[in-house]
Structure formats: C-alpha cells, structure tokens
C-alpha cells in the first residue's frame, strides 16, 4: 500500500508528521490531494490540551477541517466532481448520512450517523464522500479556499442573529472570525458595526472590512463608548469571537441592550459563570452558533464562496502565513502567537 504523510498531536504543544496508508477509494468516495488546510483556533485548543483530541476526532490529520484540495481519484458513481477539480471541503456535509432529521434540515453538523473519513486535514491525501465539495473558481487560490470554513462560521452567526437591517452590532475580537463577522454584519444590513481589537493590525483590518468604529479592547471606557455609539442603550446584537480565558461573555451581556442578542462564537477553556439575574432582567437571548448550515435554502459555504470569489469580501489578504506540512509544528507555534500579525496560518502540503 502507498504511504502518505499525516500530522499527529503527540503531546502538549507538539505536533509531528508521520506516515499513514493511502486509503482505498470505495464507491461514492472521492480522494483529494490536500492543497491547503487552515490552522483554526479549535486546532490550537487541541494542540495545547490534547485531551480534546481523544475520542471523536481521528488522530491522523490533527483535526484539520479548513480544507481545500484537488480531486485525484473518484469512486464508482461519483457525480459531483471530476478528477482535477479543486474544491473547498464542507466536512460535515460530506460525512453526513443525508437521511436523518438534522440532515433534512441542512444542519449537517448535528447528523446522527456521521460517516468516517481517513483523517483530518493536515495530511497529503484525504478521503471524502460525494457531497459537500465546493468547486473553487480558477481565480481563487487553495489557501483562499480554506477560508470558506471560517467565513461560513461567521456568516452562520450573523444569519442566526436574524438581522432585519439597521441594527447596531458589536463584534468582540478582531481575529479572523471577528473580521469576517464584521463583513457579514455589514452585508446583512447592520446600520453600524463596532468592533473591539487587541492589536493595531487587527484594528486596521476591522476598519478595512467595514467596521464603523474600532475600540481598543483594553480601553477602560469601552462599555460607555459603545453604549454612547449605540443610542445610549447598547448594541442590538453582540457577537463574541474571542473565547479562551476572556471575560467577553460577561462583557457582552453587560453592554448589550435589553431584549438584545448575544452570539457566542468563541471557545472557552473553562466553564464560564454567567449572571442569570442580569440575563432575566434584560430578557437576553444567548445563542451559541457552531459551524454552518443551510438556512433559507442557501448553504453558508455557497454564500462564502460567492462573496470571496467576487472580491466583495477580500478574504485573501487575511492569509498571513504559509508553511509546508513538514513545518506543521512551526505553523502551529506561529498561529498561537497572535501578536505577530497573524490572521490565518495555512499549511500547504505541496510546499514540502
Ligand atoms: Zn475552523
Ligand atoms: Zn444525518
């Protein structure tokens, strides 16, 4: 059997490349040569605390899920793609059973009978099913194709917030998801978008992607400034995109207006205490969007692809670093240090 490379988590903050067998392509399956895979915050969580990797995720490929690849082999009966096509992969849709209640609703993340794949995305080759493969236009690089995944997450959060137009939206955090949330909120009709940013390069990007006002996240007057900008009441919607050890859920609940919505996109290291009294008094909705789905007959992947391909959202300028698969440890180290101008680190196996 032919052998390919895959990355494995081997200990806290340690990821190494080792061999895996090249999988057999069964009917209905598609073999992709991975051209690029983005290093996402969830990958960094798994890297820092490997307890999160045991169990559900296959270990090979280190839970990479922001995948763009090229079709190298198709099994019998495959109709959606041809050998040579370059695609962005919607992993949950590809693996979904297509028959359960959640699949019928287009909520593939919640499929009750997910099918197995050979590995996560930090590999030379990945086996997928004949679904969830979104063809990339010529003009779009594979690295840019990896942005379908994070951009879809931000679109999902904004769509779940149900903007009707004219709202004031506060985005907490100006990493990749926050920047994409700013762009998405603007596209969905927000009247004013305010964004908090920790670093200068993040603040600049937030403004480029449509933020009307960017506030330093360490500004002690942050809450008052945001409320002033939002008619004195506070924003209608707050999108939290920080996670980790930040107190951004509490901050969001405090600053949002009564009967407002808080969308929590960040992943937190520990359980977070919340002031339920405040939530009741303000009649808040706390919503935890995860991944993406079909809503209103459109999949967020389709929307993300259109918006990136047209240049309406200039995602490619957020690809800040590129590494070969052999340098995956370095890629993770760089991705974990936001202070150095990092938006998205992409691992590109063909680079070495
Ligand atoms: Zn991701
Ligand atoms: Zn299903």
Image (spheres, grey):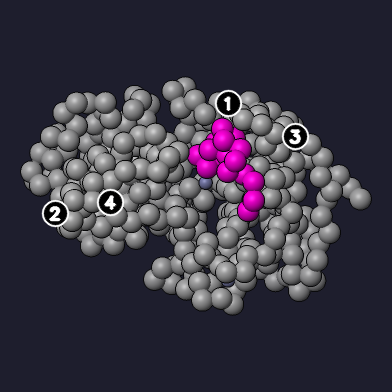
Q: Main secondary structure of the magenta part?
A: helix
Q: Which residue is mark 1?
A: 333
Residue at 22% of width from left, 26% of height from top?
219
Disc 1 element: helix
Highlighted magenta segment, given as a residue range: 40-56
The residue lying toward the viewer, choosing from 212 and 108, is 108
Where residue 46 appears, as percent x and y from the top left, is: 58, 39
**Cβ of disc 2 within 8 Å of ligand 1?**
no
Callout 4: few (<14), some (14-19), or many (20+) C-alpha neighbours within 10 Å?
many
Residue at 19% of width from left, 32% of height from top?
222
Disc 4 element: strand
Disc 3 element: strand
Disc 2 element: helix
Q: Which residue is mark 4?
A: 262
Q: Are marks 4 and 1 in contact (CB under 8 Å)?
A: no
Callout 3: few (<14), some (14-19), or many (20+) C-alpha neighbours within 10 Å?
many
Where residue 113 appears, as percent x and y from the top left, is: 62, 69
Q: Between disc 4 and disc 2, whose residue precedes? A: 4
What is the quadrant of residue 167 in the picture? bottom left
Q: Are marks 4 and 2 in contact (CB under 8 Å)?
A: no
Residue at 71% of width from left, 38% of height from top?
7
């Amino acid at each position: 059997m032919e052998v390919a490379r895959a990355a494995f988590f081997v200990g806290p903050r340690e990821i190494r490349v080792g061999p895996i067998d090249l999988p057999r392509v069964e009917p209905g399956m598609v073999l992709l040569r991975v051209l690029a895979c983005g290093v996402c915050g969830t990958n960094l969580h798994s890297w820092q605390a490997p307890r999160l990797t045991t169990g559900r995720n296959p270990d090979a490929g280190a839970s990479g899920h922001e995948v763009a690849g090229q079709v190298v082999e198709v099994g019998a009966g495959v109709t959606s793609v041809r050998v040579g096509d370059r695609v962005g992969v919607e992993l949950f849709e590809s693996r979904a059973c297509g028959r359960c209640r959640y699949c019928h609703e287009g909520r593939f993340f919640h499929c009750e009978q997910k099918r197995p794949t050979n590995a996560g995305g930090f590999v030379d080759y990945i086996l997928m099913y004949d679904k969830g493969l979104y063809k990339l236009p010529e003009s779009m690089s594979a690295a840019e194709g990896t942005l379908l995944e994070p951009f879809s997450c931000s679109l999902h959060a904004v769509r779940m917030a149900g903007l009707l137009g004219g709202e004031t939206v506060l985005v907490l955090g100006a990493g990749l998801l926050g920047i994409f949330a700013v762009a998405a909120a603007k596209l969905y009709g927000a009247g004013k978008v305010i964004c908090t940013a920790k670093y200068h390069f993040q603040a600049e990007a937030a403004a480029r992607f449509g933020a009307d006002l960017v506030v330093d996240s360490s500004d002690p007057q942050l809450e008052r400034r945001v409320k002033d900008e939002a008619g004195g009441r506070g924003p209608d919607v707050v999108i939290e995109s920080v996670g980790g050890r930040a107190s951004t859920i509490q901050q969001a609940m405090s600053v949002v207006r009564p009967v407002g919505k808080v969308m929590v996109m960040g992943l937190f290291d520990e359980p977070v205490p919340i002031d339920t009294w405040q939530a009741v008094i303000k009649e808040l909705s706390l919503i935890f969007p995860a991944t993406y789905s079909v809503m209103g007959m459109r999949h967020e992947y389709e929307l993300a692809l259109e918006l990136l391909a047209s240049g309406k959202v200039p995602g490619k300028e957020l690809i800040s670093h590129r590494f070969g698969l052999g340098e995956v440890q370095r890629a993770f180290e760089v991705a974990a240090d936001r202070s150095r101008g990092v938006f998205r680190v992409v691992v590109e196996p063909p680079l070495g």
